[in-house]
Amino acid sequence: MQARSRSSLYSLSDEELMEQFQSGKTEAFELLVYRYKDRLHNFLYRYTRSREDSEDLAQETFLRVHRSKDSYRRIAKFSTWMYTIALNLAKSLYNKKQRFQKISMHEDPEDSESRKMVFENGELPQDEVFDQRESVRYLEKSLKELSPEFRDVIVLRDIQKLSYEEIAEITDTAMGTVKSRINRGRIQLKEILEGYFDNLPQTS
């Protein structure tokens, strides 16, 4: 009977699962955890750069979802609501530990004003001096120089692939401001990274 009940939940949306959970079905919450645990852990790891921290934050996020289930209203997407909780927790930890994430920059096809991260030679340097690990290290150093509002929207957009609408809701920011911050953040990252590249030792 329990297996049949659980099976019937798989076809439900996230929002419907939350309603089932609010009505007392713990299996619905377990299914939400199953659906999001990997994506949430990945997001938090990118933000903290610490497996231990990301695991702790993911557990805390789900715990708060569980505790605050009655405050959820279907007018918001479940994912937006959950990521808001996770982002607030990650930002609190970030303020204490000042750790940064690796991020991949790209042109955004949904935004006609999006600016692509383009370097003079078309790609990050890939030689014996500047290997992949060095690329990540310089990228993390450059993120350290960005303000939190730029970092937040870039992570949500470029790593989590959230829509502008979701990011605006999560960050409680106007849509135009979200797009502006993403573009301005990308421009600043490009300038900072190019400064690092220009100072790399030259090979003979």
Image (cartoon, rainbow, N blue to C red):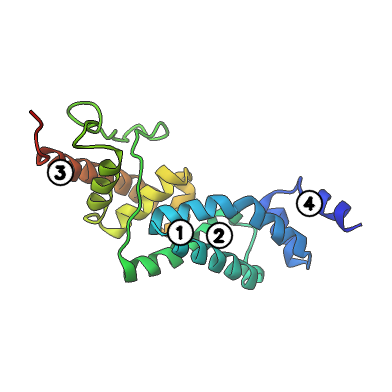
Q: Earlier in the sequence, mark 1 or mark 3?
A: 1
| 177 vs 125, nearest the viewer | 125
Residue annotated with mark 2: 82
Label 3 SS: helix
Q: Earlier in the sequence, mark 3 or mark 4?
A: 4
> What residue type is disc 3 on?
Tyr
35 over 87 or under it: above or below: above
Residue annotated with mark 1: 51
Tell me the CA gap for discs 1 and 4.
31 Å
Residue drawn at x 55%, y 59% is 82
Tell me the CA gap for discs 2 and 4.
19 Å
Q: Is residue 134 left or right of residue 17?
A: left
> What residue type is disc 2 on?
Met
Q: Earlier in the sequence, mark 1 or mark 4?
A: 4
Tell me the CA gap for discs 2 and 1.
20 Å
- Circle 3 or circle 2, nearest the eye: 3
- Circle 1 or circle 4, nearest the eye: 1
Point out residue 46 in the picture as x, y percentages from the top left corner.
41, 52
Q: Is residue 148 left or right of residue 127?
A: right
Point out residue 179 in the picture as x, y percentages from the top left corner.
35, 45
51 over 193 or under it: above or below: below
Label annotation for residue 39: none
Q: Earlier in the sequence, mark 2 or mark 4?
A: 4
The crowd level at tag 4 (other Cα within 10 Å; few <14, some 14-19, many 20+) is some
Q: Earlier in the sequence, mark 3 or mark 2?
A: 2
The crowd level at tag 3 (other Cα within 10 Å; few <14, some 14-19, many 20+) is some
Tell me the CA gap for discs 3 and 2.
36 Å
Residue drawn at x 74%, y 59% is 28
> What residue type is disc 1 on?
Arg
Label annotation for residue 9: 4
Point out residue 116 in the picture as x, y percentages from the top left corner.
29, 33
| Badge 3 vs badge 4, beta-carbon distance below 8 Å | no
